[in-house]
Amino acid sequence: MTETLFGGPTLPPAYPERAAWGTAQKLRAWQQEALDLYLAKSPRDFLAVATPGAGKTTFALRIASTLIDSGAVNRVTIVAPTDHLKRQWADAAAKVGIAIDPNFKNSDGQHGRGFIGVAVTYAQVASKPLLHRAKTEAARTLVILDEIHHGGEALSWGDGLREAFDPAIRRLSLTGTPFRSDTSPIPFVEYAEDRDGIRRSKADYTYGYGNALRDHVVRPVMFMAYSGQMRWRTSAGEEMAASLGEAAVTKDITSHAWRTALNPAGEWIPAVLAGADRRLSEVRRTVPDAGGLVIATDHEDARAYAGQLKKITGESPTVILSDDAKASSKIEDFSAGDKRWMVAVRMVSEGVDVPRLSVGVYATSTSTPLFFAQAVGRFVRARKRGETASVFLPSVPQLMALANSMEMERDHALDRPEKEDGDGLFNPEDSLMDEANREEKASDSLTKGKFEALDSQASFDRVLFDGGEFGTGGEVGSDDEMDFLGIPGLLDAEQVGTLLRQRQHEQLNRKNRKAPAAAAQQVPAVPDHRMLMDLRNEPGQERGRVGRPDRNPSRGGAHEVAHCLRRTSRGTSQRGAAEVPAAQAAGLVRGPQVAVQVMSAPPSSISATASSRSSAMPAVSDRTTVTP
C-alpha cells in the first residue's frame, strides 16, 4: 500500500486513480463487498444505499458489465431523475464500454442502433409505461433505478414504474437518501416491520456517510452557521424584528426571519457570500481548482446572488437555471474548468457530479431532510485524501438539526409511529390536541397578505462538525470568524476535529482575557433587591458588629449600605451622598449609568465622591465615580 501525504496508507485499493464517474478499473472496498454480495445472491431486486459521493455509479456499472459479459442480460435501461443525469450516466457507461442512448424519446419507439440500452427519466416512464414495458419484455433487461426514492413522488410515477419494469429480469435500485417525508411506498423496495410495528425500507447493502468518512471516501463537511438581526413589515404595516435562529419564537417568525436573511437587498447575504469566498480562497491555496456553489430559492434570487458575487470576486459566476436549454453544458464546462463560483436553483442539488465543489452556500428556505442531504452531497465527493468541504447556512433550528445528524442513517417509513401515553396506550385525543397545539398563534398578519423584508444584519454564529459545535460567535470580519474561515483546505476528518477544538480553546482564552476589562466598564446603578433583603434579615448580632474595628468588612459594610439605601429612599439622610457610592463600591448596586471600580481594600479605606450636585440627596442612577 502506498503512503499518503499524512503518513498513513491509502484505504480503498483504487482510491488515487479513481475518476469521478464510473471509470475505476478497481473497486473501493465497499463496492467490492457489495458486488460480492450481489453475485452471491443473484437477486432479481437489489437495493444499494450509499451516501452521496461514495461511488454508486461505479458499483452499478460494474454489475451491468458483469451481467452483460455472462449473458444474463442483453439490454440495460437506466432511469434517472433529470435529463442532465441521463447524459451523465451515458457518459460514464461509455467509459466502461457500455453504449447507452440518453436521447431516446417516447415518440421514437426504439433506441438508436449500436446502443445496448437507453437512459430515461422517471417522468418519461410514467407518461408511457406500456411502451417501456414492451421494450422490457422484448429482451433480458437489467433496469437500474437511480435515486429510486423519486419513484414514490406521485402515485402515477409509482404505478408507471411497476407497470413498465415488472417483467425485468434484474432490477438494481440505488439511492443515497432512502427516505421520504411522506408515506408513499417506493416501487421494488422491500419493507419490513421494526420492533414498534413500523414498516421501514430494507436495504440489501448500506454504506453510510459515517463509514465513508472513516474510510476517507468522502470529505469531512464543516457547517458555517451565520445568525443576525432581521426586520420585516407585515401587510398590516406592522414592523417586526427577530434574531435569526432565536429559539423562543414561533415557527412563523422563524420562517419570516429566514426569508429576510435570504433577501438579496439586505446585508446578510452579501456578508455570508463574502465569508464563503474568503473560505474558498483559503481552500484554493492547497486545492487550486476548488469551486463554490450557491443554492438559491428561485431564479430571481439566483441572478441577484450572481451579481453580488461578481462585485466580490470581479468574476461572473456560472448561473444554472432550469429553463436554460444550455444548463447541462454549463454544468459540464464549470466542472471541467477552474471558475470560482456557480449559482443554481435546484438543478445541481441532486446527483449532479462536480467533484471540485468544495464550498457551498445554502441560500434556500427548503428544509426537508431529503433535499438537505442531497444538496450537501454535492460537496462531499472526494478526489484525493484530505480535501475538506464547507457549507455556509442560516443559523435556524431546522438546518442546525439536519447538519448535526449528517451521519444518521434513515430508512423510509410507510407508517407513522403512534404517540403513547404514560400507560403505553395510544390516545387519539392527545394526538389531535398535539396537532392543534402545533398551530402557530402568532399575529394574523404573519400568515396573511404580503411580506416585505426591511433589513438584515449578519453575524458569525458557530461551526458544526461531526455532531459538535465550535466557536463563540462574533462580528463579520472579526478574528472570531477568521479563525474558522482560515482553516486549511487539505485536512482529514481527525485533523479537522483537532483544529476546531484548538480554535475553540483559543477563542475562549481570548474572551476570558477581555472579561475583566469589560466587567470594570459595566455600570451598576439598580439595587440588587435580593441581596438587600438578605442583609435586612440578618441576625441582630451581625448588625451590632457594624462600626467595630474587627467587623467583617463584607457583612458589616454591606449591612451599613443597606440601611443607607433605606434612608436614601425616604430622603432622610444627608449621608446618602457618600453612602450610595459606597454601596456601588461594594458591588450591591447595578445599572447602566454608574462607573465603578471595586478595590480589595476594606470599606473604611474607600472614599467616594458624588458627582457635583446640590446638597440634596442624589438619585441612585446618578453617575458616580469610586476611587481608592
Image: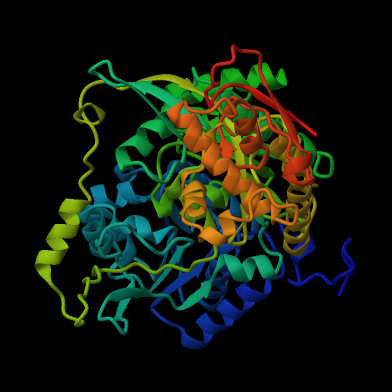
Q: Is residue 620 above or below residue 127?
A: above
Q: Locate residue 141: give its quadrant.
A: bottom left
Would you say 273 lies left or right of 154 here? right
The image position of residue 150, as x and y in percent, is 35, 55
| Residue nearest the viewer, comparing 113 with 538 | 538
Percent across and percent down for residue 599 are: 77, 41
Q: Residue furthest left?
A: 429
Looking at the image, how many numbered discs can be counted on the residues? 0
**Residue at position x 21%, y 71% in the image:** 418
The answer to whether residue 344 is above or below residue 400 is above
Q: Along the horizontal axis of the image, is 111 left or right of 516?
A: left
Residue 336, visible in the rendered structure = no
Q: Position of residue 463 (x, y in %)?
A: 63, 49
Please state, as top left, top right, bottom left or bottom right, where the C terminus lies in the image. top right
Q: Residue at x 58, y 83 (%)?
A: 36
Residue 158 lies, in percent from the top left, at 25, 59
Q: How is the image coloured?
A: rainbow
Along the viewing direction, whichever of 443 and 341 lies nearer the viewer: 443
- Residue 319 location, quadrant: top right
**Residue 495: in sight, yes or no?**
yes
| Residue 490 falls left or right of residue 64 | right
Q: Is residue 324 above or below residue 162?
A: above
Tell me the quarter of the image containing the N terminus: bottom right
* Rendered residue at 31%/45% (across/down): 106
Is residue 196 rendered to the left or right of residue 626?
left
| Residue projecting furthest to the bottom | 40
